[in-house]
Image (cartoon, rainbow, N blue to C red):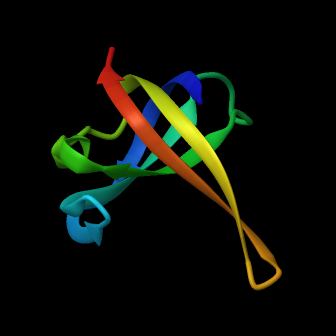
Amino acid sequence: MKTIICRVMSQTEATSVTTKNGVQPKCYVRLKEIGDDFTDEYNCAVLGNLASVKFQAGTKVAAAIKFRINEWEGNTYQDITAEDIVQI
């Protein structure tokens, strides 16, 4: 897990998805680390009650993100999940 200080670039509308924990909201948030034009950006999945929170573009936040690598049928995929996002 990594904690970053960043700005919200965009956020999708929350939709309902079925998980092993039941039905819960899910959205995607694009985060960009604060710095110059060449800082890292992360497109994070957000699940649960946090997906219902709307962040305005440009909002400064602290985010705890988790990286996970999956291999399936010979291909490698990276998932990024935001565990917590707090407005600063």
Vertical comparison of 77 with 64: above or below: below
Q: Residue at x 39, y 23 (%)?
A: 61
Q: Nearer the viewer, residue 26 or 88?
A: 26
- Which residue is painted at 18% across and 41% down in the image? 53
Q: Is residue 59 visible?
A: no
The picture places residue 5, in percent across and down from the top left corner, at: 51, 20
Quadrant location of the C terminus in the rendered image = top left
Residue 84 shows in this picture: yes
Which residue reaches farthest top? 88
Q: Residue at x 48, y 28 (%)?
A: 64
Classify residue 17 as left or right of residue 6: left
Taking 59 as reference, is 43 left or right?
right
Residue 4 at x, y = what percent?
A: 55, 23
Residue 19, picture quadrant: bottom left
Above or below residue 56? Residue 22 is below
Give the number of marks. 0
Q: Is residue 42 above or below residue 33?
A: below
Q: Residue at x 59, y 30 (%)?
A: 1
Percent coordinates x, y for residue 28 in the rendering: 39, 56
